[in-house]
Amino acid sequence: MQAAHNDLGTERIRKLLMKYALPAIIAMTAVSLYNIVDSIFIGHGVGALALSGLTVAKPFMDICAAFGSLVGVGAGTLVAIKLGEKDLASARRVLGNVIVLNVALSVLVMIVGLIFLDPILRAFGASDETLPYARDYMSIILYGNITTHIYFGLNNMLRSTGHPLKSMTATIMAVLINIVLDPIFIFWLDMGVSGAALATVLSQVLAVCWQITVFFDKREAIHFTSGIWRLEPTLTRKMFAIGLSPFLMNLASCFVMVILNNQLKRYGGDLAIAAYGVINRFVFVFFMIVMGLCQGMQPIAGYNYGARQFPRVRRVFELTAIAATFITAAVTFLGEVCPTLMVRIFTHDSELVNASASALRIVVCAFFVVGSQAVTTNFFTALGMAKKAIFLSLSRQVFMLVPLCMLLPLIPWNGGFLGLNGVWWAWPISDFAAALLAWYLLLRQMRIFNQLHLNQQQLLAAEETFDLDSNSAE
């Protein structure tokens, strides 16, 4: 493990990014299969209303994920920084705090969620027809919330402690089990959406059992041991400060989806919500690949930032941003060239296919800029620059997308109003505006890194000159 930590500061950046990003990409692609597999089975086996109910439940799932990311991402970044500083004792204590905090927060979310389940789902856009599907799905997901939080928290720890392959293994294990259990519960046992939720929870339970065995191995530098289970206010504050950006991003995603679901319901009914569910799942696959790239970047950027190796920090960002832009450009290409083919993966309902395909063309027309914007946000998170990361996290969704989806439908158009098309056009406009903002903040930060590196070079040159003068005097 110590060799892995040293490699973060010495190995070629391209090779390191391949080593850390490829397992993370595979893992995050596998994560996206959770939603996709459930959607495919439910869309084809239960119906369009069930798919709409699943879309309504998605914001609630984002709330659960938000609390998990508050702890998990913050802890993973903090561990990477501590390892860069050679502070193994603090890194071990972070591991213990991750478990304790995840258990506490997940129980709180579960209790509140189960008590107010129906009112929350109705506020999120559920109708009388879609509420039963959303309720059946989310009640089981909430009962398994503890496992979900621990699963994602430990996966972040595995990546940040030099085990990207083990993190990938845990994710793939969970996805494969989910894929096997889905048809059994949904079709053979005729459990419908409840079966999809139960398959997801059980797959994560088995994955967590395997993760725990890894951290019980005392040969690992970061492992479970006595004295790490007491919550430490200093570590907790740092974890929350770093994890606040992805937490607010997920929370903002929930808030945005609530607004969008209600706007879609107002202008297009349950069919428009189902169409959004199809589009969201198509885009989600590619966006999770970008998130995998970001996860591969974070320990490299965090370690080298802690070690004050600024050129390596800049290089890992550049490579990640280029790769992410190619991925999101593929979304724009597929969405514009063959939208019907893409949406038919999720449903055979002709009315839903037509509605989804026409909306997809609008939604993804500017998606090619999202890759660099997402990498920039995660880059600031990896460096512990929480305020910048939080601002960028909120800019695209809350500051831009929400106002636009409220205002654009009211714009006069062809003797009427934009209506539903106005909601769809809010996406590409907010994507492009948020990217411009991210590029501006990034350029400012890169100038700072260049100046810091120049100062380091000047200091080294001065020290060498002093040594030469001292040797001459002797």
Image: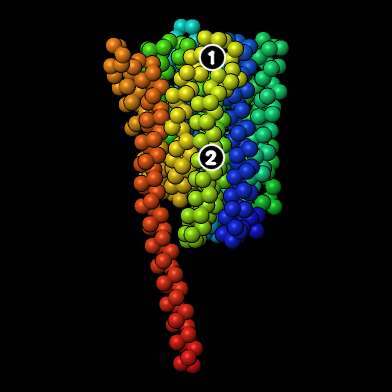
Residue topped by disc 1? 353
Q: Determine crowd level at label 2: few under 14, some 14-19, many 20+ residues with C-alpha closer than 10 A.
A: some
Say which residue appears at 42% left-offset and 72% top-offset: 459
Q: Determine crowd level at label 1: few under 14, some 14-19, many 20+ residues with C-alpha closer than 10 A.
A: many
Q: In the rendered view, would you say 186 is above or below 143? A: above
Residue 397 percent coordinates (x, y): 39, 31
Q: In the rendered view, would you say 177 is above or below 222? A: above
Q: Are marks 2 and 1 in contact (CB under 8 Å)?
A: no
Say which residue appears at 47% left-offset and 23% top-offset: 361
* Residue 83 position by quadrant: bottom right
Say which residue appears at 47% left-offset and 18% top-offset: 358
| Outermost residue, bottom side | 474
Q: In the rendered view, would you say 63 is above or below 455? A: above
For badge 1, the amino acid type reads: Val
* Residue 241 position by quadrant: top left
The secondary structure type at the circle numbered 2 is helix
The secondary structure type at the circle numbered 1 is helix
Residue 244 percent coordinates (x, y): 42, 40
Residue 18 percent coordinates (x, y): 62, 48
Q: In the rendered view, would you say 267 is above or below 318? A: above
Residue topped by disc 2? 326
Residue 173 is at least partly visible in this image: yes
Residue 362 percent coordinates (x, y): 44, 24
For badge 2, the amino acid type reads: Phe
CA distance separating discs 2 and 1: 27 Å
Q: Quadrant of the N terminus?
A: bottom right
* Residue 229 position by quadrant: top right
Say which residue appears at 41% left-offset and 12% top-offset: 268
User: Is 4 on the left-hand or right-hand side of 297?
Assistant: right
| Outermost residue, top side | 128
Q: Which one is earlier in the sequence, the residue at label 2 or at label 1?
A: 2
